[in-house]
Image (cartoon, rainbow, N blue to C red):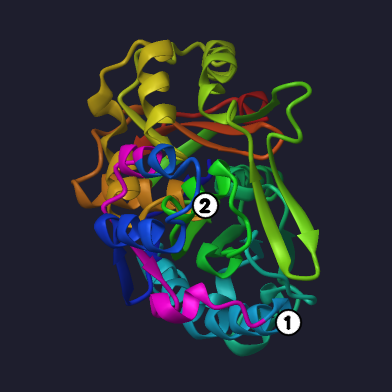
Amino acid sequence: MATLCKPTVSVPEHIITMEETLDLARTLHADHPQLPLALRLIGNTGVLTRHIVQPIGETLEHPGFEQRNKLYVAEAKARVPAVVRDALENAQLTPAEVDVIIYVSCTGFMMPSLTAWLINNMGFPSDTRQIPIAQLGCAAGGAAINRAHDFCTAYPESNALIVACEFCSLCYQPMDLGIGSLLSNGLFGDGVAAAVVRGRGGEGVELQRNGSYLIPKTEDWIAYDVRATGFHFLLDKRVPATMEPLAPALKQLAGDHGWDACDLDFYIVHAGGPRILDDLSKFLRVPPEAFRFSRATLTEYGNIASAVVLDALRRLFEEGGAEHQAKGLLAGFGPGITAEMALGCWTCEGEDRVPIAVEAAV
C-alpha cells in the first residue's frame, strides 16, 4: 500500500510581481496590436508573484540555447539536492533505502538524466532504477506519482523518489509575440519539488488507483516548437476549456473505484490557470474552496509546471492534513491533452490501514 509522503518545494530567490510583469509588457510591446488583450489575460491569471532563477534583466536576454541549457544544468545541480534531502527526511528514509528515482522536467535537457548525477553524488545505491520523463509537461507531476505507485505496487517493499525540476523562465523567447506567448510570459514560474512514495509505512496519501486520459486530436494544443533558439512554447486558445471533456474522465476513474468524484474530501490538481480550477469546480459540482491549495500555488508561484501538484499537496500537509481515511483526488494536466489522475486515502502514521485489492491499484 504505497503512501505519498509530504513533498518539499523550493523556489528561486528572484521575484517578479504581476505589476512588474504588466509594466514590462507595456514597455516591451507598446506597439503590439493586441496589447490590451494580453494585459487583460495576464491580469486575469491571478498570479501575484513568480520566482525565477535569474534577475529579470538577465531573463529577458537570450544568450542562445546552449548557454541557457548550461544554466539549466547548473541550477538543477545546485537546487535539487536540498529538496531531495528534505523529502527523504519527511519520509524518514535514507538514500540507501530508495529503489527508483523518477525525474520530471520539460524546461531543459540532460543526457544522462539528472538521476545519474543524483545517484553518483547523493549516496543512492548504484542499482537504483532511473525513470526520467521529459515530454509530459505539466502533466508529468501526476505521471510521476502514478509511475511511483505502479513501481511500489509491483515491488511492495520498495520506495520511490519523485523529483520535479522546472525553470520555465529559461524558455522565454523575446521574439514570440503571439497572444499565447505573451500570456505565458506572465503565467509561468520556476520551482523544484521532491517527494517520496513509500511502499510500506509513512503518513500522507495512500495511493489506491491511477489512470490516464488523452483528449483525442489535441496533441498540437500544447507543444514545443524546437528551434536553434531553444524551446518555443505553443499554447492554443482552446486549452482553458479542456476541463469539460476531462471532468468525465475524473468521474470515470473514481466511479470504477466505487467513489464519487463530486464528493471527495480533498482535491490536489494542476493549476494551469484560474479557468482550469473554475471549470473543475463547475463540472465536478464541488465548491471553489476545494481547490484552494492549487489556487494558492498559482497565486504565489505561478504555473510551475510539473511541480504544481507536489506544491499543492505540500500545502495540504501544512494545513494539518486530512482525517484518517479521507478520500482524495490528485491530477496533473498537460500536453496531449493528457490527464494523469490518482485516487488515494489519507493515512496517519500508526493508524490501522484498510486492505486494498491488488486490482484496484492499476
Q: Is residue 96 left or right of residue 291?
A: right
> Who's the residue at 35% across and 36% down the image?
346
Q: Is residue 134 left or right of residue 170?
A: right
Q: For mark 2, what is the residue? A: 305
Residue 131: image x %, image y %?
73, 60
> Is 41 contained in the magenta span?
yes
At label 1, the amino acid type is Glu
> Who's the residue at 47% across and 46% down the image?
183
At label 2, the amino acid type is Ala
**Which SS class for mark 1?**
helix
Q: Over which residues does the magenta segment extend? A: 40-63
Q: Nearer the viewer, residue 29 or 166?
A: 29
Mark 1 neighbour density, 10 Å: few (under 14) some (14–19) many (20 or more): few
- Give the vertical position of 31 relative to 292 (above or below): below
Residue 349: image x %, image y %?
31, 49
> Who's the residue at 40% across and 57% down the image?
25
Q: Gap in Å between the C-alphas at discs 1 and 2? A: 22 Å
- Give the vertical position of 30 relative to 221 (above or below): below
Q: Earlier in the sequence, mark 1 or mark 2?
A: 1
Q: Quadrant of residue 276?
A: top left
Q: Nearer the viewer, mark 1 or mark 2?
A: 1
Residue 350 visible in the displayed image: no
> Is 325 contained in the magenta span?
no
